[in-house]
Image (cartoon, helix red, strand yellow):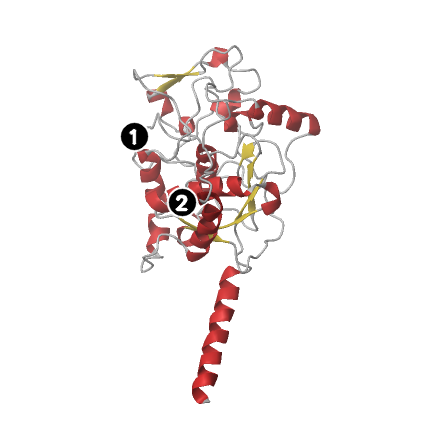
Amino acid sequence: MEGLVGWIIVLALASSLIECHSQRHRPPNAKHGDMQPHSVGEAARVASQIDELDDEDEANPWELSGLFEGDILLDRYHSRNGILNESMRWADGTVPYFIEDEDFTDEQQLVILKAIKEYHQKTCIQFRPYHKKDTSWVVFRSNSSGCWSSVGMQSDGQTVNLQSPGCVRHGVVIHELLHALGFFHQQSASNRDDYVRILWENIEPGHEHNFNKYNETEVTSYGIEYDYGSVMHYSAKAFSRNSEPTIEALQPNVTLGQRKGLSEKDISKLELMYQSQCAQREGSEDPEPPGFIDQFNSLLGLFKENAAFPTYGFKK
């Protein structure tokens, strides 16, 4: 009888743990980016431009999103501080996240999780599902036009918006998450004039501010050389008024920017930025938080049977 009672208790505890582990908590509305940042007309224009992009276009979808530098949601209280502001780093290098089911198909959710997985495989950063106790988190939405994010950790939740169709692409998710982790665009670096020339005469009037530089009290390269191939670099014709280049590399035979994923220098800078935060998490050898890997494997299983894996390229 005692043995039976013991087994009942064990099973009850196991069931409770499984239920707790699998429970999906919905966060409150994010304080940052919960509302459409565009007017109705501007939202339609942005959505149409991004939807029309294909593999042959040099422009990146985040350059067309109609916000500061294209895709940065500026908070009126924080303006442009970020990468050097320790208060805007994610504690322990861990980012709680929530994907809004109603905004994305299962295939699109898997694209988002595959981008997160690249961070797990190549950096010390971890993403895990949102818990009710979290005071800061990222929520993936697609209820606004454009691809955009805040820069750095914001309290009370922040939106990473991925317009669908158009923005739910591997490299785009990587790019927007680097913003959320604390990075501005590469060509904003204080030393950029040693590596690129800004062709001001080709920039669309009213968009010159997108090519401003930040001084070293706001951003840092952590001693890493300028990265032409960063996923955070503008394309050569960003904000062009005449289809001519707006940025010209001062070194030969280089391509400005890409939308494939993290570059080696992106990884190095991210690791240096979060070195102390990730060190606080040492002792945990699992690179994939259980909640994330359960969600990833569940979605992956939906596609294995018919080999309907998502593609990362732009539509043809």
**What residue is rendered at 57% in x and 19% in y?**
206
| Residue 28 visible (yes or no) | yes
Element type at mark 1: loop
Question: Of circles 1 and 2, which is in front?
Answer: 2
The residue identified by callout 1 is: 225
**What residue is rendered at 43% in x and 28% in y?**
188
Relative to 97, does residue 19 appear above or below in the rendering? below
| Residues packed near mark 2 inside 10 Å, few (<14), some (14 to 19) or many (20 plus) | some
Marks 1 and 2, how far apart in space? 26 Å
Earlier sequence position, callout 1 versus callout 2: 2
The residue identified by callout 2 is: 117
Looking at the image, residue 222 sits to the left or right of residue 130; the answer is left
Where's residue 311, x and y in %?
Answer: 46, 33
Q: Nearer the viewer, residue 75 or 39?
A: 39
Q: Amino acid at mark 1?
A: Glu
| Residues packed near mark 1 inside 10 Å, few (<14), some (14 to 19) or many (20 plus) | few
Q: Residue furthest front?
A: 306
